[in-house]
Image (cartoon, grey):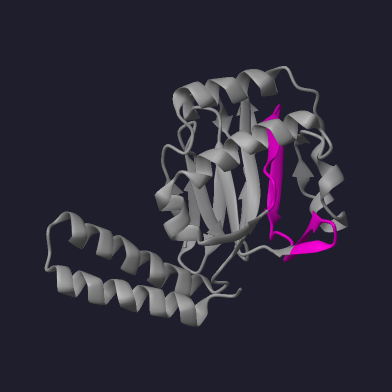
Amino acid sequence: MLLHIPGVLDAAQTKRLRAALDAAEWTDGKETVGAQGARVKRNLQLPDASPLRRELGAVVLDALARHPLYHAAVLPARTLPPRFNRYEGGGHYGFHVDGAVMALGDGVQLRSDVSCTLFLCAPDEYDGGELVVSDTYGEHEVKLPAGDLIVYPSSSLHQVRPVTRGARLAAFFWVQSLVRDDRRRRLLFELDTSIQALTRSGADAAAVLQLTGVYHNLLREWADT
């Protein structure tokens, strides 16, 4: 499921992160990928050990914790702490698929079910830099307002097109979902949003309660714990 989640960060939060990142020291993004990814990756990243990465990542995670649409769509179980990247001067990342298993530290592993990109620059601040996600329905170009998030299956082939003017800043991270199958996550999300809409419309309370029970029983059936 490819889903645009608006307003993860507000304008003040985005401005704070931008100011910190504009003053940051960056490193070659190839340092965090394997040999195959390094052949098609040309960008900059905050070093993994950077205290700034941890500080700004905590801001992003706190905002996500308070965003109901994100939780309904992703059903997060484990999250890799956000990283931050910068594309400029023709920087790009060719078509690739994200790694299936990632280290969280202390011997804990994360299965990448959902990939997430949080845009930190307005679309008119740079040319190019579209995230292109390929699936069975074709290629989808994504270039969102600052503070908005895109989520999509980590199994998807995707790329970032060259940035030919300005700079593109973003946070990115991966999530292990309670429900690993994307089709099942989509069904649960559609059911959840339907329940919320029916509740707001004042629909029959008994029917809404029954649908809520169906949702939780499906989640109980499908969830990995």
Q: Measuring 51% from the left and 46% from the top, which residue is drawn there?
A: 65
33 up-or-down from 136: above or below: above
Give how far across and how far down residue 184 sits, in percent: 46, 75
Give how far across and how far down residue 4 sits, in percent: 43, 48
Which image quarter: residue 162? top right
Q: Measuring 85% from the left and 55% from the top, which residue is drawn there?
A: 34
Q: Residue furthest bottom?
A: 221
User: Can the viewer see residue 129 in this picture?
Assistant: no
Number of disc labels: 0
Q: Measuring 32% from the left and 69% from the top, which residue is drawn there?
A: 191
- The foreground one among 39 and 52 is 52
- Answer with left or right where residue 172 lies relative to residue 108: left
Give how far across and how far down residue 70 sits, in percent: 46, 51
Q: Measuring 59% from the left and 75% from the top, which residue is drawn there?
A: 224
Let me know if residue 86 is in the magenta part: yes
Which image quarter: residue 46? top right
Secondary structure mainly formed by the magenta segment: strand
User: Can the viewer see residue 128 in this picture?
Assistant: yes
44 up-or-down from 211: above or below: above
Q: Which of the image's four quarters has the C terminus?
A: bottom right
- The foreground one among 41 and 32 is 32
- Answer with left or right where residue 90 lies relative to residue 153: right
Magenta residues (range): 80-109
- The foreground one among 45 and 95 is 45
Give how far across and how far down residue 214 sits, in percent: 33, 78
Let me know if residue 162 is in the magenta part: no
- Answer with left or right where residue 154 lies relative to residue 67: right
